[in-house]
Image (spheres, coloured by chain):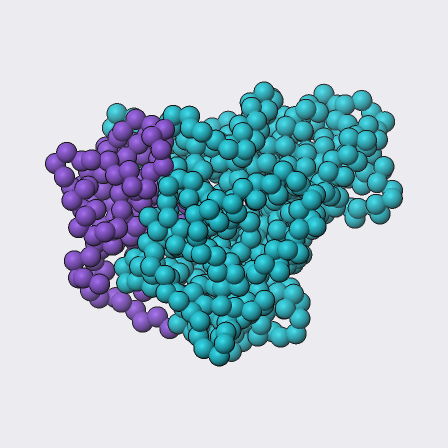
Amino acid sequence: MDASGRRDRPTSVTEPARIADLAVVGAGPAGVEAAVAAAGYGLDVVLLDELPSAGGQVYRAAPAAFAPGAGGAEAAAGAALRARLAASPVEVRAGEGVWSVLARAALRAPCAAPERREPSPPPDSEARPPRAAPARTAPPPPSSAAAWDREPRRAEPGAISGRLEEEAGFLPGSAARFRLDTLGAGGAGSVFAAGLALCPGAVERVLPFPGWTLPGVMGLAAATILLKSQRLLPGRRVVVAGAGPLLAAVAAGILKGGGAVAAVVDLNGPAEWLRTVPRLAAMPRLAARGVVWLARIAGARVPILFRHSIRSALGSERLEAVETAPVDRAGRWCDRRGRDAGREIEADALVVGHGLSPATEIGRLLRVEHEFDRDRGGWRPVTDEWGRTSVAGCYAAGDGAGVLGAAAAALSGRIAGVAAAIDAGRLASSTADAHVRRLRRDHARAARFGAAMTRLTALRPAMVEAIPPDTIVCRCEDVTRQEIDAAITRGASEINQLKHFTRCGMGPCQGRVCAEAAAELLAARIGGDPDEGRGAAGQWTGRAPLRPVPMDALAGRFDYEDLPLPPPAPP
Amino acid sequence: MAPEDTGTDAGLDARTRTCASSPRVSTALRIGPARGTPLTLLVDGEPVPCFAGETVAAALLASGRRRLRRSPRAQAPRGAFCLMGSCQECVIRIDGRLEPACLTEVRDGLVVECRGAADPPPVRRLPVG
């Protein structure tokens, strides 16, 4: 802020554009590894993240202003990741979020789908990369421009598209294929890049139940942020509910911080957890961490309600109690012993999470091809084994490309970074072969563990079916289940139609919170196989801005005196 | 619930703590002493003690303020939900601008407004459902 109390927000128009070889969005384990790997092969890399420091949610650092505290294994891993990043030539833009991405190809053929990469070769012919064949014969070019431009264009840009490109800031002859618009403490900015690696991580899925909008109800991932980064308990007496390994992590974290856990309410039963045991062997250190969590929970004599779910959160202006009831394996309410075995638990905080879904917003904005994969958290971008998406120059890695956890994310990020270097002509894929083969083997092992964890949290359609009619599904716009049902009855057959009919997903969160529940409600009415229903229900069309952008950040600072007003007509 | 309920933890208890002439920092939810330097936020005119490095959302939660705003249609109380800048539930007026409280770090004397969260407007309460 300057002396007058106004924030210094330079105009985006006058700022010189940053042109990079590779822009990486998201500085979690996947993004950092992709950036460091690509930079290691000489690419000029810009890494962007809206958080103030790298590490993502999993390795979220305590604020720099905090005195150093005792950290566990995760804190050490996060610190190591940040140290490697700091030692690399990657330009890190922490605290700078991306609110829009524009593909140059979309300007060349505005009505058609963006430029596509060639279909990947079958796995056994992997030695030959689908693109960038020149890289194998020519020495690395002085600038990445040459390599990217050698690729045949689908059509010569006409006069109109040329002007569109220039207006969007793409200089003629520049290799940039993507324009990223960003917003940070320093104001609005733009980054132009030849390649784009999407490593946005995941968003937490919380399925609606009565009272889930009450203050005091938070996500499980939110609780991890409070505990790890802010060193704060979510409440004095907390109910921890939902599914997956985060349950144990959060409950143990609250107890370690001196808080009280009123109950752990787990959708899964011991049988589901036991089924993961063979996969736990793949990552013994992670499994051991889970054992420590469980020991702490058992030691504190916290009641664990297996195969239970939250029936409602109670309270008028804030959470006062939580009502739980038993469910069957499919997540359907069941009355044990012929009566309702539900119970009410007094609590001032409920932290609840039903798993993670890939954050696909930028991919959707770029019209990247996606597929629905329930066991990987939902919709994910279709990628080849290098992480290349259907849009040329665009890669996806980490949980944003299918939820498999942090260990797998780091490895998939590194593979995508190598792919970006190969495609930019900095590296022959035959040179990278041995290295990438080892990465793939490690990734497969981490993915076995991650997939078992993600399966524990896979969305159970019966839980969505059980949402009562007057329960809010879309928090931003207060849209209830019965309004969604009514819209489907009136003919909304696809999720964007549902949005138009009801405003569900139209609010400031851009549908990130309600997407899974809304789509599942629609899929159930489409009928047939739930996964096919989800495929038919589709995804929200990606739209900028991905985050609300203050108008003055775009307009910049100006004096009214300086506005070029035409002189008034003579009298 | 009592009509004078403020939506904060322990109602009056939390109020006396944050309104006291010499504001004592609530350590009830804060884990450990390893924090930044003590600062003061001005929340709806009341001084709220906090520590450098905390986000506005965390400082409000630690002060017992869970209710941050009301939803636009049902005028229902809302608080921080995802704490990672995704859900936009904690977007409140900070230093005169609408900002997500979970991504905004506290500064000394920062003016935060949750006004309207306590008293829903009497009219325009559209039926939901």
Residue A494 showing in the rendered view: no
Q: Residue at x 58, y 50 (%)?
A: A358
Q: Residue at x 52, y 47 (%)?
A: A294
Q: Left of A476 or right of it: where is A382? A: right
Question: In the figure, the cyan chain has which letter?
Answer: A
Question: In the figure, the purple chain has which letter?
Answer: B
Q: Left of A38 or right of it: where is A317? A: left
B43 is higher (above) or lower (below) than A15: below
**Which residue is outermost to the left?**
B21
Q: Residue at x 57, y 61 (%)?
A: A269
Number of marks present in the image shown: 0
Q: Left of A321 or right of it: where is A446? A: right
Residue B10 showing in the rendered view: yes
Residue A446 coordinates in the image, percent (x, y): 68, 42
A533 is higher (above) or lower (below) than A354: below
Residue A98 coordinates in the image, percent (x, y): 50, 40
Who is closer to the viewer here, B44 or A110? Answer: B44
Who is closer to the viewer here, A540 or A29? Answer: A29
A369 is higher (above) or lower (below) than A462: above
Q: Residue at x 49, y 68 (%)?
A: A326
Quadrant that contains the N terminus of chain A: top left
Quadrant that contains the C terminus of chain A: top left
Who is closer to the viewer here, A296 or A30? Answer: A296
